[in-house]
Amino acid sequence: MSLLPTELLQIAEPARRNDTRPNLLGLSREQLKALLAEHGLEPFRAGQIWHWIYWQGVREFGVMSNIARKTRERLEELFVIDRPAVSTEQRSTDGTRKWLLRLSDGQEVECVNIPEEDRGSVCVSSQVGCTLTCSFCHTGTQPLVRNLSAGEIVGQFMVARDSYGEWPSPTESTRMLSNIVMMGMGEPLYNFDNVATALRIVMDDQGIALGRRRITLSTSGIVPMIPKVATELDVNLAVSLHAVSDEVRDLLVPVNKKWPIAELLKACADFPSARNSRRITFEYVMLKGVNDSDADARELVRLLTPIHAKVNLIPFNPWPGAPYECSSNNRIHRFAEIVNAGGLSAPVRTPRGRDIFAACGQLKSESVRDRRTKVRDLEAKAGV
Ligand code: SAH
Ligand code: SF4
């Protein structure tokens, strides 16, 4: 793939690596109150600070003008408000922006904003790397280093807002950054607690105030965790299906060996919002000669008809050394026709930001650590 010219902005912003003061970013309201109480600060301060951090977008206590100077100084001594530091910002010729973010321990993670006519979707990562080795995904070739904290997850969205100057939190109708898709690096359901805390912060109406319908969590199919997306968060669900037989899905999404298609679709059929008006999105990557035949399309219709579903057809985004090719345009459109004729909406997702390697499945930062131990740790933690 040839790279188009891009604008690469270097922003020197040192991460606070040696600072031991706790970071307030990413604490739930209750945790914030408790931390303040530990230091003898009144509970109502939590609401004030929350407003400054998540509504006004500030990073310094000094500007919190409704808090007395002495208290501000004390807050400054005790805590920090720290987002991930921007190592680089890249701007695609199609308007997509991608940030390489440096975390306080030096690990790196990527975050992307995809502007569209009526909205801007920030694609947020949940882990550094991923344990799941999907064979068509670039992130899957990067061994997992660790889960992101809630602050690092909500911090990605805030960095995107910094870049667009979108503070204080604008009204819903004037927002450029209006949606969050948990579709960056990592499997969000293997880091559920931190993802949930971050999304609750984002949805809090005294702060960033994104509506739950503007948030989509994408999973490769961690079946036992799927009900929690409805019961604890009630955000939109997207499922990376990508194949209609276990034989093919085992190769593309190896976690299928643990939770095969029938179990996955059962969890989707039981997903509460699927019974109401909200549809589950099934993502389907178009891989030449692998999963893109007419028979595959018909089987997809058969499998998804009992579920309140829509399909997102994603042209495969290539990366160096990838063992697949993207299906031809004709093939993708024929496939879409069959799915549409079967009564399911099946838009073809236009690849965005390919020139800056920001498209689906192209994210990968340069960190390495032992994958197997990490997989075991995370699975044990997630109780699956
Ligand atoms: N881990 C989660 C969320 C991140 S991946 C998941 O797998 O759902 C976001 C979406 O991009 C998933 O549907 C994933 O399967 C898809 N994807 C990964 N690599 C891709 C590639 N090279 N081309 C197109 N889509 C890809
Ligand atoms: Fe991980 Fe999702 Fe990539 Fe699979 S597609 S390796 S689950 S990020």
Image (spheres, helix red, strand yellow):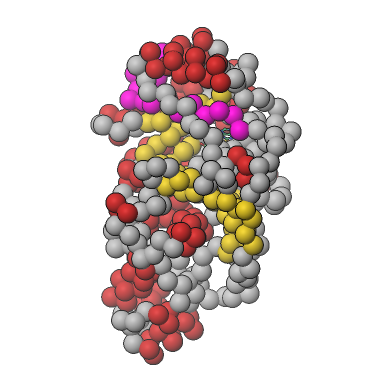
Q: Which residues are magenta?
A: 301-317
**Quadrant including the N terminus:** top right
Specify whether 297 is left or right of 371.
left
Question: Left of 363 or right of it: where is 334?
Answer: left
Q: Quadrant of residue 285?
A: top right
Pick out the residue farthest to the top: 295
Q: Position of residue 119 (x, y in %)?
A: 38, 45
Please say whether residue 151 is visible from this viewpoint.
Answer: no
Report the residue at 35% width, 59% height from top. Answer: 208
**Could you tell me which residue is drawn at 28 percent across and 75 percent down?**
44
Residue 341 to residue 255: above or below: above
Query: Residue 168, how many percent across, how many down?
Result: 36, 66
Q: Is residue 178 placed above or below 134 in the rendered structure?
A: below
Q: What residue is shown at x 31% (from left), y 49% (from top)? A: 211
Between 95 and 220, the one lying in front of the other is 95
Outermost residue on the bottom side: it is 70
Q: Is residue 110 left or right of residue 274?
A: right
- Image quadrant of ligand 1 equals top right
Is residue 66 in view from this perspective? yes
* Of 379 and 198, the residue lying toward us: 198
Tell me which corner region of the image, top left, top right, bottom left or bottom right, holds residue 338: top left
Q: Look at the image and say whether residue 309 sits in the magenta stretch.
A: yes
Residue 88 drawn in magenta: no
Q: Nearer the viewer, residue 146 or 236?
A: 236
Q: Position of residue 129 (x, y in %)?
A: 62, 46
* Residue visible at 29% across and 51% down in the picture: 173
